Image: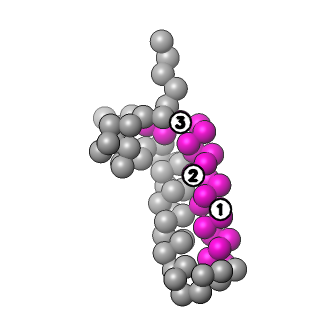
Amino acid sequence: MNKENIGKIDKIIRGIIATIGVFLFFFNVFGEKSALLPVISGCLVLNIYTGKCYVYALLGLNTCEHSS
């Protein structure tokens, strides 16, 4: 049941988005509206380390490479 459903490219994209979100927060680009950016970035990083996206699990999606 602890099966990964995030592929390598998906992890890279999530890492880039999380990094951009952190920079936008620290440089205060959106003012007070950017308070959720570190939370969203943290969730993306957590998904990278666990290899599991629970939204993908609910939707039945899987971006991992399948061995034949």
Q: Which mark is residue 19?
A: 1
Q: From mark 3 to mark 2, how far is it between C-alphas?
A: 11 Å
Q: Is disc 3 placed on a helix, strand or loop?
A: loop
**Quadrant of the image occupied by residue 20:** bottom right
Q: Which residue is mark 3?
A: 7
* Amino acid, disc 1: Thr
Residue 9 screen position, x and y as percent: 60, 39
Q: Is disc 1 placed on a helix, strand or loop?
A: helix
Q: Which mark is residue 51?
A: none
* Residue that appears at 55% across and 79% down: 34
* Amino acid, disc 2: Arg
Relative to 18, is 27 above or below? Answer: below
* Residue that appears at 60% across and 67% down: 21
Q: Is disc 2 placed on a helix, strand or loop?
A: helix
* Residue that appears at 52% across and 26% down: 65
Q: Which residue is mark 2?
A: 14
Decide whether residue 6 is among the magenta residues. yes
Task: Tell me which secondary structure the magenta stretch mostly adopts.
Answer: helix
Q: In this figure, which colouring scheme has been used for the structure?
A: one colour
- Mark 1 and mark 2 lie on one chain; the one further toward the N terminus is 2
